[in-house]
Amino acid sequence: MTELTSQEQATLDAIAAATSLDALEEQRVAALGKKGWVSLALKTLGQMSPDERKEAAPAIQAVRAKVADALDARKAALEAEALEAQLASETIDLTLPAPDMPKGSIHPVSQVMDELAEIFADLGFAVATGPEIEDDWHNFTALNMDENHPARAMHDTFYFPDAAPDGGQMLLRTHTSPVQIRSMKDQGAPIRLIAPGRVYRSDSDATHTPMFHQVEGLVVDKGIHLGHLKWTLETFFKAFFEREDIVLRLRPSYFPFTEPSVEVDVGYSNEGDRRVVGGHGDDDGHDWMELGGSGMVNRRVLEMAGVDPDEFQGFAFGLGIDRIAMLKYGMNDLRAFFDGDPRWLAHYGFSPYDQPTLSAGVGARP
Ligand code: DAH
């Protein structure tokens, strides 16, 4: 018993002196572990006479409880100390002065994407996204451009060296149209969405950059016809340019994924060095500017995306976001959009407070 008492005192001292959780664990194993001295003492009870045991058992149990309590208490103290030390080392000095002027601005492309989403949300369109690294099945084949289709060559595609999981090629998507396929495969019909995002083509001059932005539109439902397409585009452009005298011209065209296909032009006039939309493009001083492509979704595309073309029809469109941003906010060189020049951004950027809303307007100026 005296031996037990001295061992107890030594252990309690060591626990009190422990400065790390590891040191504490050592003490726990030495006392309460399988071969620890407390466990060994408990084992001796088996060889004792009942009378001896009656006396010794509560004493050993008391030692065990004391050691266990001391371990718990010291562990809690060490953890609290560690937390205090961590909190002390991670303080933030809130007395630093705030900058005089808020820095940064919303890029016109981001602002215009928000404007698009706001206007189309009001027409019941959801916003969909798809990967910028695509496979050639979604980017081309499912859009009715099989491997030998000449339209593939016109897309100036950036290809990756690695093969796609299906053995095809991986590429940077050349348009937002593959989101049509992904969305129809995921959600089926009816469907009503826009898909804004980055697209890539190996091309560069004042009006072309290797990365640019498009917004895709897709409506699939029963009985959809060209009239729905025309109304939707007109309604959108009136809301976007915030004027009623928008005149659109739909020109017959060809896209493999639509039939019939139309190109969409808007009438504009020159005011100084700025193009201002509105009015009839054939009037004096007016002209037409191409904004994008559209048409009735080709039956083969619906089929490849798993939609029954005898039950559902659809229209689609693809517009250049950078282009309509230039037209609305008066920039004349597309390349400056992506130069990151802070003077350009300060001039053409938007305040974060200018969230486009239908009530406050979708065309607030900085
Ligand atoms: N994807 C076409 C392009 O980038 C644009 C386009 C044309 C999209 C017609 C459409 C469409 O959805 O119906 O050149």
Image (tube, helix red, strand yellow):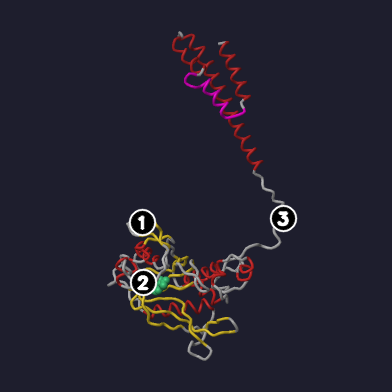
CA gap, disc 2 to disc 1?
Answer: 21 Å
Circle on res. 257: none
Whether residue 110 is in magenta: the answer is no
Residue placed under numbered mark 3 in the picture? 97
Identify residue type, mark 1: Ala
Query: Nearer the N terminus, badge 1 or badge 3?
Result: 3
**Where does the magenta region start and end?**
19-35
Q: Position of residue 81 (x, y in %)?
A: 63, 34
Identify residue type, mark 2: Ala
- The answer to whether residue 316 shows anywhere in this view is no
Whether residue 23 is in magenta: the answer is yes
Mark 1 burial class by Cα count in 10 Å: few <14, some 14-19, many 20+? few
- The answer to whether residue 139 shows anywhere in this view is yes
Q: Position of residue 122 (x, y in %)?
A: 48, 72
Picture quadrant where residue 302 is located: bottom left
Identify residue type, mark 3: Pro
Viewer-closest of 29 and 107:
107
Q: Position of residue 337 (x, y in %)?
A: 56, 69
The residue positioned 60% from the left and 71% from the top of the image is 348
